[in-house]
Image (tube, rainbow, N blue to C red):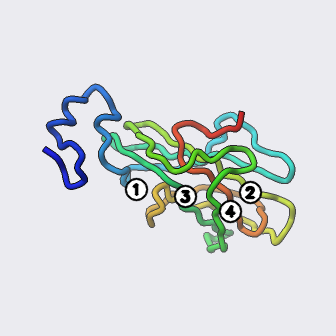
Amino acid sequence: MHNQAGRPGKQATALGSGSDKAQATAECQPGTLRATLDSAGTSQSGMNHRGTFLRVKNTGDETCVISGYAGLALEGAGHTAIKTTARHGSTYFATDPGSHPITLGPGKSAWADLVWTTTGASTAHAKYLQISPTGSNSHSTVAFGEDLDNGTLSLTAWSSKPPINS
């Protein structure tokens, strides 16, 4: 039994019931994902660059798959929109793992590195950050009291652990 995408249906999936990866056939739905900022115990600061990690947690009851890059939008005081540019790829602090599927069991997280510069060039005074884990309209808004250059953010693709250069 196969579904439209040619993947095994429920009968074949049940054979792999001991493995979350075998069961992960559906993309994570925005309503089951909670996005936050998380330093993961690492300081990212140097040469006018600052950063933190985006963390998305599967709050649903089913294993699902996420891939690609988060959607981002800055907000100022009063939640006013700030023109935001999001650059995908490696950041000053981490190598981009590239877009690839990340399997998230219930309660599991995916990570992306988020970096901005602070040289004083056309400073945007952000108060909040909208994070859309799947790039859809569904998003989490988190406190983000940062001054950053030109409203520009750099971020890596989602990965199964915080992407740190070694």
Q: Rounded to the nearest whole Å, what is the CA distance between mark 1 and mark 4?
A: 23 Å
Circle 3 SS class:
strand
The residue under the point 81% across, 72% down is 122
Is 121 drawn above or below residue 112 in the view shown? below
Is 141 drawn above or below residue 90 in the view shown? below
Q: Name the residue under label 3.
A: 131
Q: Mark 4 points at which residue?
A: 127
Q: Rounded to the nearest whole Å, what is the CA distance between mark 3 and mark 4?
A: 13 Å
Circle 4 SS class:
strand
Q: Rounded to the nearest whole Å, what is the CA distance between mark 3 and mark 1?
A: 11 Å
Q: Which of 165 and 50 is in front in this view?
A: 165
Three-letter residue code for mark 4: Lys
Direction top: furthest residue: 18
Q: Mark 2 points at which residue?
A: 116
The residue under the point 77% across, 62% down is 148
Q: Horizontal and vertical percent for residue 147?
A: 77, 61
Between disc 4 and disc 2, the foreground one is 2
The residue under the point 18% across, 43% down is 9
Mark 3 residue crowding within 10 angstroms, few (<14) / some (14–19) / many (20+)? many
Three-letter residue code for mark 3: Ile
| Label pair 4/2, CB-CB below 8 angstroms | no
Is 88 drawn above or below residue 161 in the view shown? below
Q: Name the residue under label 1.
A: 30
